[in-house]
Image: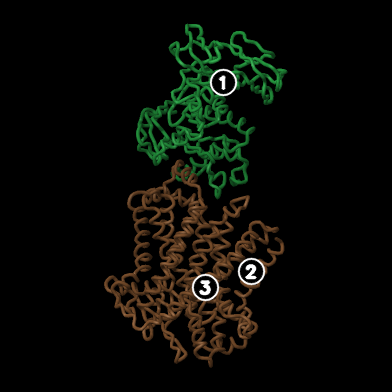
Amino acid sequence: MQGWYAVVLSFFVFFVLVPTLFVLSFLFTGWGDLQAFVFRNANVMAQILSAIGLSFSVALTVTAVDLIFGLPLAWFIVRRQFPGKSVLNTLVDSPLAVPTAGLGFSAALFWALNPAVKPQGLSLNFTNTPFVLIMLLHFTTTFPYMVRSMSAILEQIDIEYEIAARTLGASPLTASRTVTLPLFRSGIATGSILCLAKALSDTGGVQAALQTANLFAIQANSCSFTGTPSGTVLIGAWRTLGKACPAVTSQLNAGLAFVAILMIALSIGLLYAVKFVALKVRFPLKHVWPGIERKLSRGTAPRGRDLASFAFLVLMILIPSFFLVSFLITGTKTLGSPDWGTFGSSLGFSFLVAGLATLIDLMFGVPLALYITRGPSRRFGSLLDSLVNIPYIVPSAALGFSLFLFWKPLVDAGALPILAVIVLAHVGFTIPFVVRNTVGPLQAFRRITLPVIKPAILAGSIMAFTRSVGETGATLAVSPQAITAPVFIVNLLNVKTGNFYLAGLSVGILTLVSAGAMMSMRYFTRRAR
Amino acid sequence: MVSLRAEGLQKSFSGTVALNGIDLEVKEGEYVVILGPTGAGKTTLLRTIAGLARQDAGHIYFDNQPVDTLMPFQRGVAYLPQNYSLFGHLTVWENVAFGPTVQDWNPHRRDQIVREMLNLVHLSDRRDAHPRELSGGMQQRVALARALATQARILLLDEPLRALDARLRVELRQELRTLAKYLGITTLHVTHDQEEAVSVADRIVVIRRGKVVQAGSPREVYEDPSSPFVSNFIGEANFLEGILSRVDNNFSIIVLKDGRRLMGRPTSVPADSHVVLGVKTDFCEVQPGKSDAQNRIPGTVVRSLFAGKRKTLEIQTNIGLLKAKVPSDRSLSEGDEATLTFEPENGVVYSIPSEGLRVALEVE
């Protein structure tokens, strides 16, 4: 057992954690390049700062809005008994089945002022501001995480506290605000962190949306791109250009390293800032305004609040997520001469990567969870617990680039296939799912038996698998030539050379696979209860 | 002070009947214990009275005024939940002040009442502590002070002693009663613990499967149980099945299946009925040796369970295993021949329950 733990710990440290943060070493090893190609190049610097600014401002805005609309919805789902509850739950989760590249495509068709292809009918033709478009997209990618994590924690808060407050004369609003909300801080923290991480990480969705909206295009022949990318899209674009234009590779690599460093540092900083604000900062929760709160607890106010949440769910989440369907039905069904070969191989490649990554997650994630909960040192366990989250909070494209740099010597020497690096990158951002899911029941049950934790492990690995299948940024950042299905989709969304209809079909196939996986996950978790 | 009356309360939750036509009457300032096994509907009854759940049918009156449509706080009840539900992020003072604060009392009056309540439960010196820093007993007192600070007219206690250890339970139950009596507040106390019920109640209402099965003073329900269930739930009883061969004003005679004749109290059950004779184990005596005289059942001691001043002897007889609680100094031990006896006035005659004796005694 002891030996196995040593193997598992060293795997986590040397194959996951260190490679994830390896790019930080570029500050020392590549300082000259950074100065030459980045700090003294106003143009590059401006591109980097605008991309990072866009990423973080969108992520923060999206998280705030998700909180406002997600809280009443989570409350409604947990505290009300109504027919069709499981239907509502499924609806909230449903965007998770669509790969983010597909969500970007779909949301852009719905919102973009002037999308590259025009579905018949409901398109809103609303915006061509990158900030607004990406924000609208990220509602669809993050809202399910927000609602799910808040309702999971709300579920554990005993309703007795609210009942006690009600008998003491508190209106429903006062009771939930002064009594439940303070117990709920961890729910808000978890939801916000998941939401921020997801928004910051997204590459495929943003790139698909910007390309569909005609707001971004990579021009390999002129070694440049047009438009305003987010931080992760910038990483993907520079990696792609680096392959196409060997002359500027080292300049681009310096820029890439700097973007990755900034994103990693800022997101880890943000993780702790959010934790601190959500868990430590004192809010004026104790003060009570009985009259106002009583009025707000009755009649139109709570109904309006619930209605607004449902409207948000339908208009901002569900319709944009699945708007692609209307394009598949009414759009011009020109497949041209589709590259079925690449289509098939990209799907196969995606499943291969996801399968291998999930397998490694299982081999090392479960013992890691065991070590965290049952290991010899409680302190070290909880330190490990927070370290496991780092690869998740780091934007996956930055993680991918960092891994690329870390393994580059071995890859260049021909000692390590690029597939291995891609798989390891996917392990980085998926292993937390397996660890997180397994830690829960391990803490709850004194005696561990496989039947007890099996459903949680399965749920964790299916989450890891679907997340891996839908990933674009990490793959692109490791190798722009590795064509997984989401990369294939993003490449197809190109005004000049692309095939939007084929992209739509690919999204459909990936969605069906993920939906199947999610349904089996539900089955396993339900059986666990 | 307020009287409380409930009429025909019905409540079910998705098919499960929790209250099946409960009638209840509590006088002003009375301390009534609702006693019943787990799942009998006790908590539902309390919540319905508090206004936390709405009954499907029936009415609730405080001082003869219907309160069915009133919100919990409008009813003026103080409700002490099972696990106290103290607000962990608030101090003792803030917990107790919660009710007056959310009801928007003027701060002067609020502070005065909070001070009074903390004095009453002897926690003035812990006013700045957080609940987690207090012992279980202190937490219970904080919850009580918090409930009482709203100047409620009726106190509802849901298993108030459940979370405490056995010794503290005994201590605090008397304190609860003393406090309620001191305040003169009408109190409804729910428990499944018959010993607790007997020791604090003015009156006990035994409920089972959503129905009141008996109501009366502790003495009445103990000494004169209206059914085998009550007889066995409050205390413990031996049940002897037989045919009622004779009844008159002084006693009744039951013939057991082995032909043995036993004497019990007079009964209204008609002669020749199939009956069961219930005798509390507390009222049984055991003598050494075998005897077949009047109201004596011979057998062999198979088990002796020591419990301080008294011990329980289990005696195997040819009509089954019988129990008796006797003083511990009785020099009888396992394997000894012994005879169980009881006075005729302690044997209560019931018609055999239609659902069978075993089902009738079930504590679900």
Residue at the image position 64 percent from the left and 22 percent from the top? B314
Residue under numbered circle 1: B238
Dot 1 falls on a residue whose secondary structure is: strand
CB atoms at circles 3 and 1 under 8 Å apart? no
User: What color is chain B drawn in?
Assistant: green
Residue under numbered circle 3: A352
Q: Are marks 3 and 1 on the same chain?
A: no
**3 or 2: mark nearer the eye:** 3
Measured from the top left, where is residue A169 in percent x and y?
44, 42
**2 or 1: mark nearer the eye:** 1
Residue A501 at least partly seen: yes
Residue at the image position 62 percent from the left and 71 percent from the top? A17
**3 or 1: mark nearer the eye:** 3
Q: Nearer the N terminus, badge 3 or badge 2?
A: 2
The 10 Å Cα crowd at callout 3, few under 14, some 14 to 19, many 20 or more, is some
Examine the rendered structure and indicate whether residue A341 appears above or below residue B104.
Answer: below
Chain appearing in brown on the rendered image: A
Chain hosting mark 2: A
The dot on residue A12 is: 2
Chain hosting mark 1: B
